[in-house]
């Protein structure tokens, strides 16, 4: 082939591709939505994995529970029309009639029993099995009535039924939950192209009147924040659910094509200290660490000011939240004094182990490192891969002792104060008084009394400083103008799209 | 053939051991931050991860020889099928990048060689210097900003499959292919230039010119053909590198290819997938090397293999 032929061929290919360009621009119909998410779910089974990426696709969209947590965090009757209890030990639920699974069969009480029994069964790999520990028996009264009796009082029982682990599915489809989850939700899973996208389509027989409003939802997995931003700006995705960093928010706010939704979450970004290791066995050192951190500066530097300062392990969306962030305020002089009292007049050396997959953890650690220097704490940052973090810092079996001094991560679970009552948790904080308080709160069903216990726990955590609660990670969601119905706050990790639509 | 088999066996052993030395346990990643130790142990057992290493390795190699690469931990589907499903993205992407690389680099290199120490040479070499210096992911982002965000000619990424037609499919691979090929283009252009320059100094080129052959014939029939051996050697190595480079570009353009499968599998510690992909890529590269060796003989009949 000669140069001339080569050149002509190249030109022809280029032209052909450029011509194809104009014809193939995707036309987004007003009833379809493309959503960017960062992480592809590892399977679609809510009953075997706690991964929040699964909940983002399946929970509330494909599968639903007896009770739903709405966008304000309130528990509302859902697949159960109503329920009653006289002793807070025996709960009777009345199921909504005429609710059909995606395979056309009507949901019955036997399905509810099957789902709950399976969750309680240690043989099933249910990720939240211990939440069902209080259940004694599940009794089917008739096709639409079911009674759950508890061994002991459990203040979180109804909440457990509202969570992602308690979705109801047809028992005959239990073996395909991982790839083709069936449920009662407003959408069905139509296609999953591994590594690329999941497509949900409207469930035409959905029991909720007028829902869902969209015909089709496409989840696109784009992990790289720059690529996500480019896809948004090029118009290839309509909504970025979790993919945009705080550094892009101001720029996007000025862009007339987009709306930026900044809301609250249950994600507490926590600086963990290994309480079983010196010097963090000493409460004075832990308090000194807390006094040494200027949280406002951290929030500004790491999150560009988005988020809320925390003082304890209860998030602002929790009904029992009290603001204790001023209890142990930024006070470097006091930090130095406490360090001297504890026997560290010249400070000490410490290493942060953080996973750059969660960039905010590295950014926060960098700022805190420079703040530490002012009180004599010499901190180093070691960046490790997420799987390494999980096995060494977070330390699940076979790991015996967590291998870290300090770390930072967001704890996204709602009501996760329980972690501090667990001496085996990677904080390794073992405090009998706190454990007693927590145990009491679990069996206290009276709201006012329970609130009082929660307030006392928050005060105690702030005063004992087993960790430093830095800030609530904000919800930063970007959508094209015209998309309505998205949740502003996230009282639990979901991406409920049933009420989302395009405004005319 | 024997060396080939030994190479692949070594690669298989290496990748098997490396993924097991990595900290991070697949079972832990499956149960995640809310899971219990018992759940992790159950998963470990079901994956066969608590068997002795040598048993696991023998089992894996034995099955691999029969074409069974095991099942993905995170997707719960056969690894071979996963790899096959990613090839329609990575293969054309690599080939397009290689095509771009060769179609651009050889003419540019030839041009620079025939215009040595003149303006054309300097411009061509400056361009290729830029190509060497710009990281592929950054080139990719710049291309997206210009052609997708600013001009709107292309999509910012994604691949909707060949079912949508050959042209749209090729189109969605064009920008990543250019970004991917850029670095290798620059290297190959420089290689071509110096290889051709070397040949142009040879006596037989003088002879060809002396007997009055047209310059075009001298260049293509005598100089380029003889310069092809080093060019081909480099290009063969580059083809392998292009495949590796697709890992980065597939992330930037969120293409569902082999590279992204590997990245995802590594961070999920999906060991069967990591092993399968590495073994597959090793096979491809070994095959390319064999093909290059055979091509030598075509280009230069003096080279013979017994």
Image: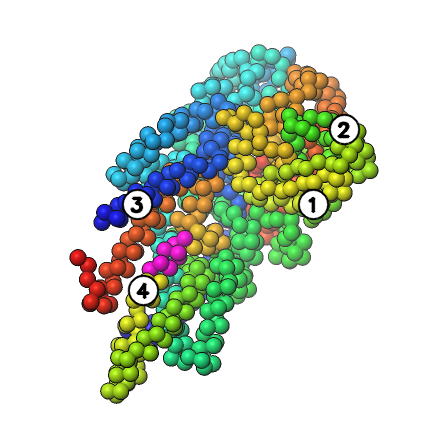
Q: CA distance from mark 3 to mark 4?
A: 23 Å
- Label ID, residue A367: 1
What residue do we see at 51% from left, 42% from top? A39
Q: Secondary structure at mark 1?
A: helix
Whether discs 3 and 4 lie on one chain: the answer is yes
Marks 2/1: CA distance? 25 Å
Front residue of A223/B137: it is B137
Q: Is residue B154 visible?
A: yes
* Residue A67, disc: none
Depth-wise, is mark 2 or mark 1 nearer the camera?
2
- Report the mark closest to the observer, 1 or 4: 4
Query: Marks 3/1: CA distance?
Result: 48 Å
Q: Is residue A451 above or below residue A263?
A: above
Q: Main secondary structure of the magenta part?
A: helix
Q: Judge whether residue A203 can be spotted in this image.
A: no
Indicate the chain on which mark 3 is placed.
B
| Image disc number at residue A342 | 2
The label nearer to you, 2 versus 3, is: 2
Tell me how far mark 2 sits from mark 4, CA to CA: 69 Å
Q: Nearer the viewer, residue B200 or A51?
A: B200
Q: Residues within 10 Å of mark 3 (few under 14, many from 20)?
A: some
Question: Which marked residue is nearer to the observer: mark 3 or mark 1?
Answer: 3
Which portion, as a residue range, is magenta? B236-244
Q: Quadrant of the N terminus of chain A?
A: bottom left
Dot 1 and dot 4 residues touching (CB under 8 Å)? no
């Amino acid at each position: 082939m000669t140069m001339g032929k080569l050149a002509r061929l190249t030109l022809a290919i280029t032209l052909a591709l450029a011509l194809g360009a104009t014809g193939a621009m995707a036309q987004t119909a007003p009833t379809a939505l493309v959503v960017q998410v960062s992480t592809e779910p590892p399977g679609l089974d809510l009953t075997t994995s706690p991964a929040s990426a699964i909940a983002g696709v399946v929970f509330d969209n494909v599968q639903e529970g007896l009770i739903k947590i709405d966008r304000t965090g309130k528990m509302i009757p859902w697949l159960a029309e109503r329920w009653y209890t006289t002793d807070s030990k025996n709960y009777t639920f009345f199921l909504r009639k005429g609710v059909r699974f995606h395979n056309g069969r009507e949901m019955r009480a036997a399905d509810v029993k099957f789902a709950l029994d399976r969750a309680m069964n240690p043989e099933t790999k249910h990720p939240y099995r211990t939440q069902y520990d209080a259940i004694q028996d599940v009794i089917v009264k008739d096709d639409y009535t079911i009674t759950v009796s508890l061994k002991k009082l459990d203040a979180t029982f109804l909440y457990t039924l509202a969570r992602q682990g308690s979705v109801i599915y047809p028992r005959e489809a239990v073996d395909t939950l991982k790839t083709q989850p069936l449920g009662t939700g407003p959408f069905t899973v139509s296609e999953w192209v591994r590594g690329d996208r999941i497509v949900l389509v409207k469930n035409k027989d959905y029991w909720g009147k007028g829902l869902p409003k969209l015909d089709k939802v496409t989840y696109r997995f784009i992990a790289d924040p720059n690529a996500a931003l480019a896809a948004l700006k090029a118009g290839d995705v309509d909504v970025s659910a979790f993919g945009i960093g705080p550094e892009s928010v101001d720029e996007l706010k000025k862009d007339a094509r987009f709306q930026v939704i900044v809301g609250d979450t249950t994600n507490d970004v926590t600086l963990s200290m290994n309480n079983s290791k010196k010097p963090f066995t000493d409460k004075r050192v832990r308090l000194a660490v807390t006094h040494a951190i200027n949280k406002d500066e951290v929030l500004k530097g790491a999150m560009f000011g988005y988020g809320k300062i925390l003082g304890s392990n209860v998030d602002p969306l929790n009904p029992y939240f009290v603001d204790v962030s001023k209890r142990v305020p930024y006070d470097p002089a006091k930090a130095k004094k406490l360090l001297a009292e504890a026997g560290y007049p010249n400070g000490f050396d410490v290493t942060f182990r953080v996973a750059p997959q969660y960039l905010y953890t590295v950014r926060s650690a960098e700022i805190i490192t420079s703040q530490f220097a002012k009180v004599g704490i010499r901190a180093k940052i070691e960046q490790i891969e997420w799987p390494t973090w999980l096995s060494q810092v977070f330390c699940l079996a076979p790991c015996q002792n967590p291998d870290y001094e300090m770390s930072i991560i967001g704890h996204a679970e709602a009501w996760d104060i329980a972690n501090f009552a667990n001496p085996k948790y990677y904080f390794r904080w073992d405090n009998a008084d706190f454990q007693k308080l927590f145990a009491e709160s679990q069996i206290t069903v009276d709201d006012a009394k329970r609130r009082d216990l929660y307030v006392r726990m928050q005060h105690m955590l702030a005063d004992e400083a087993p960790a430093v609660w830095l800030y609530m990670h904000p919800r930063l969601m970007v959508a094209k103008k015209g998309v309505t119905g998205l949740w502003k706050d996230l009282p639990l990790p979901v991406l409920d799209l049933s009420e989302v639509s395009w405004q005319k | 053939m024997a060396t080939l088999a030994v190479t692949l066996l070594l690669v298989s052993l290496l990748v098997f051991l490396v993924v097991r030395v990595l900290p991070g346990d697949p079972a832990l990643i499956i149960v995640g931050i809310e899971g219990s130790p018992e759940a992790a142990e159950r998963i470990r057992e079901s994956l066969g991860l608590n068997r002795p290493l040598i048993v696991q390795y023998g089992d894996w190699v034995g099955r691999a020889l029969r074409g069974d690469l095991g099942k993905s931990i995170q997707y719960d589907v056969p690894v071979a099928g996963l790899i096959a499903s990613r090839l329609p993205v990575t293969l054309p992407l690599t080939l397009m990048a290689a095509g771009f690389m060769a179609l651009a680099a050889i003419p540019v290199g030839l041009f620079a060689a025939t215009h040595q120490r003149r303006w054309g040479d300097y411009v061509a070499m400056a361009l290729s210097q830029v190509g060497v210096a710009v990281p592929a992911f950054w080139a990719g982002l710049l291309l997206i900003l210009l052609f997708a965000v600013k001009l709107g000619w292309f999509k910012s990424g994604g691949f909707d499959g060949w079912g949508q037609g050959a042209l749209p499919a090729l189109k969605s691979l064009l920008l990543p292919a250019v970004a991917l090929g850029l670095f290798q283009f620059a290297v190959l252009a420089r290689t071509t230039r110096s290889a051709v320059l070397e040949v142009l100094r040879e006596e037989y080129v003088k002879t060809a010119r002396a007997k009055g052959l047209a310059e075009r014939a001298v260049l293509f029939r005598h100089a380029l053909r003889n310069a092809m051996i080093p060019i081909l050697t480099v290009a063969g190595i580059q083809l392998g590198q292009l495949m590796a480079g697709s890992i980065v570009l597939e992330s930037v353009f969120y293409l569902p290819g082999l590279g992204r499968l590997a990245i995802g599998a590594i961070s999920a510690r999906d060991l069967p997938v990591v092993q399968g992909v590495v073994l597959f890529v090793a096979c491809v590269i070994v095959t390319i090397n064999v093909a290059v060796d055979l091509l030598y003989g075509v280009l230069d009949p003096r080279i013979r293999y017994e």
